[in-house]
Image: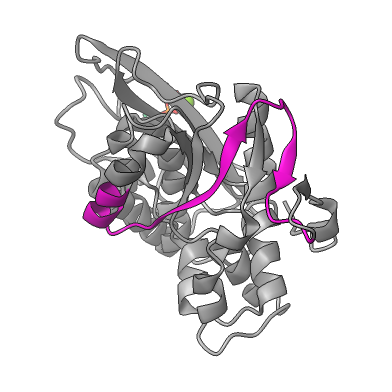
Amino acid sequence: MPSEFDLIRRYFTRPTRHADLAVGDDAALFRVASGMQLAVTTDTLAAGTHFLHGTPPHDLGWKTLAVNLSDLAAMGATPRWATLALTLPAVDEGWLAAFAEGFFDCAGRYGVELVGGDTTRGPLAMTVTLFGEVPEGQAITRSGGRAGDDLWISGWPGMAALGLMVLQNRVQLADASQALAALHRPTPRVEAGETLRGIAHAMLDVSDGLAGDLAHLCECSRLGVTLDVGALPLAPLIAAGADETLARRTLLVGGDDYELLFSAPPQACGALAALAQKLGLPFTRIGQFTEEAGSILVADGPEGSPYPLDVCGYDHFALPD
Ligand code: ADP
Ligand code: MG
């Protein structure tokens, strides 16, 4: 039976280049470049709450870091160092090896170094704390929106929620691979977040459904929004096999998207189109900030007049947390 130290050495100790001291001492040491602010975020994934029991460990390793990367991306920060607190019901070396591989695949892809952590016994859960850097004063917060800004969403919101419905046997798709990949191996929009510095006024990453997170952005920016429901990017969900009603629901109230929702002045439209092309990541304009704080209106009402978004109308869909 390997000791905790053997396991840490075997699975979670990798050389680091940017930390002064990493795994193995009582604390890690690293320094932030001058002129940069430290950006810190933490997120837990717990079995049964954030993922289904039996989720492949490689995917869990990837996702536990990816969800944190998404938070730093939403600040416009560059990820650097991470700690990993692992709670394991038992020592299963096959599981640990696959989990570590998934974690370091993601870490390698985004230039993150694992500098420490904790390993304990208990119901399966993992917490990552992620440290990143952002040029002083340039972080993109939730509160920076301005009336008249366009609202944009990246990528394929709703796809992960569709994947969860497949796993729960609530929907069947001819080819579920894209939906399941979105659920298990989300792509954090790190490069997009960094490049949006100086363009986006307000930003957050969508993890609890577009409608709810849009309300958060409005609240923090003390603004309202008119939502162009006709512009919502339903087509990829429909192409993946959802009907239009399901596509709209997964997009508005599904979760686990890890897409970026941001506001930018209308004159940034051209720059955003060029950026989307460069990144190979669609940005869809879905509405506009208004001065009416807290008012979330759908622009294209039945009589052509705006009406309040009825999120409750979609709520019976309620995905588990
Ligand atoms: P202490 O009891 O002093 O907190 P630990 O036994 O918890 O030390 O950890 C020993 C070393 O291994 C520390 O440097 C810690 O950061 C690191 N560590 C523990 N668990 C993990 C893990 N899951 N991933 C990465 N590093 C870990
Ligand atoms: Mg410890």
- Who's the residue at 34% across and 37% down the image? 268
Quadrant location of residue 295? top right
Q: Is residue 62 left or right of residue 23?
A: right
The magenta stretch spans residue 27:
no
Residue 292 appears in the rendering: yes
- Who's the residue at 42% across and 47% down the image? 66
Residue 52 appears in the rendering: no
Badge count:
0
Residue ranking furthest to the top: 34
Residue ranking furthest to the left: 17
Quadrant location of residue 192? top left
- Who's the residue at 52% across and 72% down the image? 235
Q: Nearer the viewer, residue 290 or 170?
A: 290
Q: Tell me how the rendering is colored.
A: one colour
* Residue 180 horizontal/vertical position (percent): 51, 71
Asked if 213 appears above or below 20 in the picture, the reply is: below
Q: Which residues fall within the magenta stretch?
A: 273-302
* Residue 20 horizontal/vertical position (percent): 19, 19
Asked if 49 appears above or below 146 in the picture, the reply is: below
* Residue 265 horizontal/vertical position (percent): 42, 32
Quadrant location of residue 76? top left
Q: Nearer the viewer, residue 89 or 219?
A: 219
* Residue 198 horizontal/vertical position (percent): 31, 26
